[in-house]
Image (spheres, grey):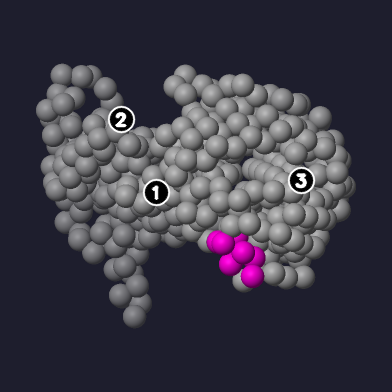
């Protein structure tokens, strides 16, 4: 038992402490969070615009939404990431994390648009009619009345999409970015240890997402305030 | 004055309104009755363009509102609408439901609108509910708030689309009371309803709509005592 414990602590030291390897993981964590947050913001903006396109009566806008979601859903995200980085932004000298965020934002936007579309459609048409009958224009009705209610309905799905997004970013190593996954990978190569770095990577993702889930649940309870009877 | 000329509304092959010509004078309370599916709600919704007429004209104070280039939002500020299912905004408090439109449309400051909200809530007997959410109110209370919300824009006309049809019987009275008091202030009202007692007591004129046209109209006394049209007679025999 003592021997086993000693070997564990030794491996732990070698994997995470020696040569300040934990700093690699911290850098990785920073990058994962930064890319996920930026991509989520972009994804919500793109998703909302696409949802508006799909709900509009204009057939050209409908077409944009259809083609966009078809392409994004029909190709792997790692292919999309590499096309964005090596083709679209090949000659642009932007930081890698920003380009990765754009790629994931574009990807996430397609899924978010379906969520938002469903959320807007779930709000009773009478709400729009009531808003318009008071003299509010279409945009005021959308943002003051429909969107806040839709938000409440879509919040759990949106949170779910954000969690998926965080895990999706584990492929940014393909364009040479160090995120949590890549940091674990580096440690694995440097130490010839597989167990400790990979389990460590998994635990960091798990804790990150657990914390986020906790925060999302809190926020949802807050959003449901007006439902309390 | 609301004028309607040859109003037609078709949903595909279904002709809901088949040419209605009508005038609602200022200060008049017009009660619209008729069997379900007769087009009375569609008629009312056309007056504020929640339904776009297929043909004909809706003219409010001399302005044709279903013409290109009309700012319908401006027109609607002058026409309050009360719905069968209340359509209160569930994410906002009662106070916010009432003040949202006047403040957003820069008709009042938030302070003025808040004062107006309390004044209106007092009138409908719900001053203590200002900070409640719609989900906490009974049906009758919701509809009274909805009336207050429409009145907050200080409209010249009020349209009611079966305002008591979704209510439990014991709550109908409180809503009709509010409407009766509103009529007494001289508000111009068009009310679609199945409440014959209200029609008789408060209406200045009854329109009987069936098959998308005004089949018969008269003052309430003669309308109920002495209906002329066969369909009116048959309808009244079923509801009275």
**Which residue is located at x 12 percent, y 28 percent?**
A87
Identify the residue under disc 1.
Answer: B15
The answer to whether residue A169 is left or right of residue A151 is: left
Identify the residue under disc 3.
Answer: B204
Looking at the image, residue B105 lies above or below residue A194: above
Asked which quadrant contains residue B85, the reply is: bottom right
Element on which disc 3 rests: loop
* Rendering coords of residue A211 (x, y %): 48, 56
**Which residue is located at x 23 percent, y 32 percent?**
A60
The answer to whether residue B204 is left or right of residue A4 is: right
What range of the chain is rendered magenta? B230-237
| Chain under callout 3 | B
B40 falls in the magenta region: no
B231 falls in the magenta region: yes
* Rendering coords of residue A39 (x, y %): 34, 38
Identify the residue under disc 2.
Answer: A98
Asked which quadrant contains residue B140, the reply is: bottom right
Q: Does residue A68 appear anywhere in the picture?
A: no
* Rendering coords of residue B102 (x, y %): 70, 31
Q: Does residue A156 appear anywhere in the picture?
A: yes
Q: Do the residues marked 2 and 3 share a common chain?
A: no
Looking at the image, residue B167 lies above or below residue B69: below
Which mark is on residue A3?
Answer: none
CA separation, marks 1 and 2? 57 Å
């Amino acid at each position: 038992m003592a021997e086993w414990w000693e070997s564990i602590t030794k491996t732990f030291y070698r994997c995470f402490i020696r040569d300040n390897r934990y700093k690699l993981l911290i850098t990785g964590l920073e990058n994962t969070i930064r890319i996920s947050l930026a991509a989520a913001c972009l994804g919500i903006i793109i998703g909302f615009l696409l949802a508006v396109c799909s709900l509009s009566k204009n057939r050209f806008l409908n077409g944009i939404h259809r083609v966009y979601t078809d392409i994004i859903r029909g190709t792997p995200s790692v292919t999309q990431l590499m096309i964005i980085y090596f083709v679209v932004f090949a000659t642009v000298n932007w930081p890698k994390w920003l380009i990765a965020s754009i790629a994931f934002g574009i990807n996430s936007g397609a899924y978010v648009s379906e969520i938002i579309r469903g959320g807007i459609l779930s709000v009773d048409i009478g709400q729009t009619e009531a808003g318009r009958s008071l003299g509010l224009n279409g945009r005021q009705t959308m943002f003051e009345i429909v969107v806040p209610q839709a938000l409440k309905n879509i919040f759990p799905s949106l949170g779910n999409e954000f969690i998926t997004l965080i895990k999706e970013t584990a492929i940014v190593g393909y364009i040479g970015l160090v995120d949590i996954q890549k940091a674990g990978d580096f440690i694995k190569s440097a130490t010839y240890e597989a167990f400790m770095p990979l389990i460590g990577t998994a635990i960091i993702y798990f804790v990150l997402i657990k914390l986020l889930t906790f925060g999302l649940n809190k926020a949802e309870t807050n959003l449901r305030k007006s439902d309390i009877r | 004055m609301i004028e309607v000329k040859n109003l037609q509304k078709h949903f595909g092959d279904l002709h809901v309104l088949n040419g209605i010509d009508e005038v609602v004078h200022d200060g008049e309370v017009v009660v619209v009755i008729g069997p379900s599916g007769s087009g009375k709600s569609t008629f009312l919704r056309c007056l504020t363009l929640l339904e776009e007429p297929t043909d004909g004209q809706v003219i409010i104070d001399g302005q044709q509102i279903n013409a290109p280039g009309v700012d319908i939002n401006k027109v609607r500020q002058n026409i309050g609408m009360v719905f069968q299912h209340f359509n209160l905004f569930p994410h906002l408090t009662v106070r916010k439901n009432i003040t949202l439109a006047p403040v957003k449309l820069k008709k009042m400051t938030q302070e003025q609108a808040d004062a107006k909200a309390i004044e209106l809530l007092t009138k409908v007997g719900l001053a203590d509910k200002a900070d409640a959410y719609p989900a906490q109110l009974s049906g009758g209370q919701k509809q009274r708030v909805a009336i207050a919300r429409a009145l907050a824009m200080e409209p010249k006309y009020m349209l009611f689309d079966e305002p008591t049809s979704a209510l439990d019987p014991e709550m109908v009275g409180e809503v009709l009371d509010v409407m009766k008091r509103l009529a007494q202030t001289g508000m111009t009202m068009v009310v679609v309803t199945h409440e014959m007692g209200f029609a008789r007591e408060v209406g200045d004129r009854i329109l009987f709509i069936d098959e998308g046209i005004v089949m018969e109209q008269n003052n309430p006394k003669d309308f109920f005592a002495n209906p002329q049209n066969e369909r009116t007679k048959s309808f009244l025999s079923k509801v009275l």
